[in-house]
Image: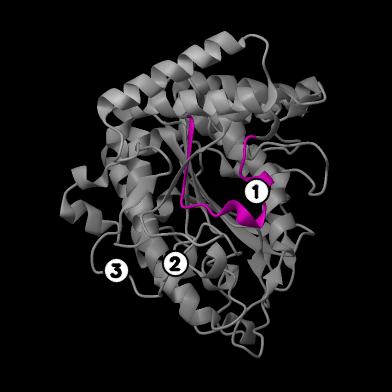
Amino acid sequence: MRNTRREMLRNIMAIGACAGTTGSWTTNLAARMRATGTSKHLIVLWMPGGPSQLDTFDLKPGHANGGQFKDIATNVPGMRISEHLASISQMAQHLAIVRSMQTKEGDHSRGTFLVRTGQRPGVPLRYPAFPASLAKELSPGASARPDYVSILSSPFINPAAFGAGFLGASREPLTVGSSRPANGNGVPENRTDAIPENPVDLRVDNLSPSTELSGQRLVRRQQFWSMLQNSYGAATRGGAPATHDTVLRRAMQLAESELVAAFDLRKESDETRRSYGNSEFGQGCLMARRLIEHGVPVVEVALSDGPGGLAWDTHADNFASVKRLSTQLDRAWARLMVELDERGLLASTTIAWMGEFGRTPVINPQGGRDHFPDAWTCVLAGAGVQGGAIVGKTSPDGREIADRPVAVPDFLATICQAVGVAPSTENISDDRRPVKLTEGQPIAELLS
């Protein structure tokens, strides 16, 4: 099947070249991928703070910039990654690594906006986050089920990078948080570096009604709400009242749907829960698998276990922090791929591992690495992805790209193509003009 897909890609690229346009071949490819069921789901593993590429997927052994970690072989010849990603190394046949990401945005807020929307930060238009845009395209139609679920994300760094933008309130993500009380930034308080002895609990924000409300009283409230909305003139109202109505109706539909059970991790065995790791991220990946099983098109899980939610912002004590984070990532991500594969879902699920930038090759006096957008790494896996591929190369010291720089719009276009959506697909913005999902071009070597 994989050879057939590669041949199909080559044939369509040849047709596009003869026609003299890139847009035609990518549109045709997306249509064919949809028809063959190449991918119907997307899981985004969001790494806020900027993960160190030199300590995860692009190590520099033997160089002063390489740091403390060793690189290890994977089950793909020539592909080597961090020793602290040992479980993932044995799933490398599903991975495609981009080692030459490059942007000009070294600020958390600006970098986050660029990577998550594909658009230049600071523009007045309310661009949607790309998971929201893809959820819209992958949605089968009207349903009580949310199209986009965001687990453990901390959008405070740039809220505009996490919402549905001009797509509207109905496309906003359903958010899932920790069961621990949160501070003003939405990050659980009393966070420590230690992994809990038992699996943590996650909860859907604002889903469960107050315990003080009886079932009959809740029904009466819903009836009263419907009466007010109908009398107010649903066809003519807009703005905040319409948004409020949309959000409330979605919440009520969800609360009464079968999907509620997918959020209840207690339905899994203790053995399964522990196999993902007891951390919030581990349990988030387990929830992602359950949501994919229930047909949710797009799920995002953030590894935000750190100060302010920017877990990978390792300006100090980089190696201890990255080892801790990598241990969580390795266990949960590998188990997620194993269980998706066992259920026949990895063949229809694309996974994207990404942050807003990388970290400096030079280690600072605090034993940390600083912001570095010049040369960093993102990873794809699963459906529509050419497993075992590596695109791009950095110099021996990691300071610059030695081969094949990749811009964010091209990486996002590749994700679009992997899930069977043409990057040239357009939505209409607030100012009534068409806006493509991304202006980038897919990276053919990363597509199966």
Magenta region: which residues?
147-164
The local crowd at label 3, few if under 14, some if 14 to 19, many if 20 or more residues have their Cα within 10 Å, is few
Q: Residue 210 location, x and y as percent?
A: 34, 39
Separation (CA) of disc 3 from disc 2:
14 Å
The amino acid beneath tag 1 is: Pro
Q: Which residue is mark 3?
A: 196
Pick whichever of labels 2 and 1 is earlier in the sequence: 1
Type of the residue with mark 2:
Glu
Q: CA distance from mark 2 to mark 1?
A: 20 Å
Residue at (32% x, 48% y) in the render: 286
Q: Is residue 256 visible?
A: no
Q: Amino acid at mark 3?
A: Pro
Residue to which mark 1 is pinned: 159
Q: Residue at x 38, y 43 (%)?
A: 288
- Circle 2 SS class: loop
* Image coords of residue 132 (percent x, y): 58, 34
Which numbered tag is attached to residue 190? none
> SS of the residue at dot 3?
loop
Q: Is residue 259 placed above or below 412 in the rendered structure? A: above
**Which of disc 1 and disc 3 is earlier in sequence?**
1
Secondary element at image label 1: helix
Q: Which residue is mark 2?
A: 189
* Spatial separation of the CA atoms under disc 3 and disc 1: 29 Å
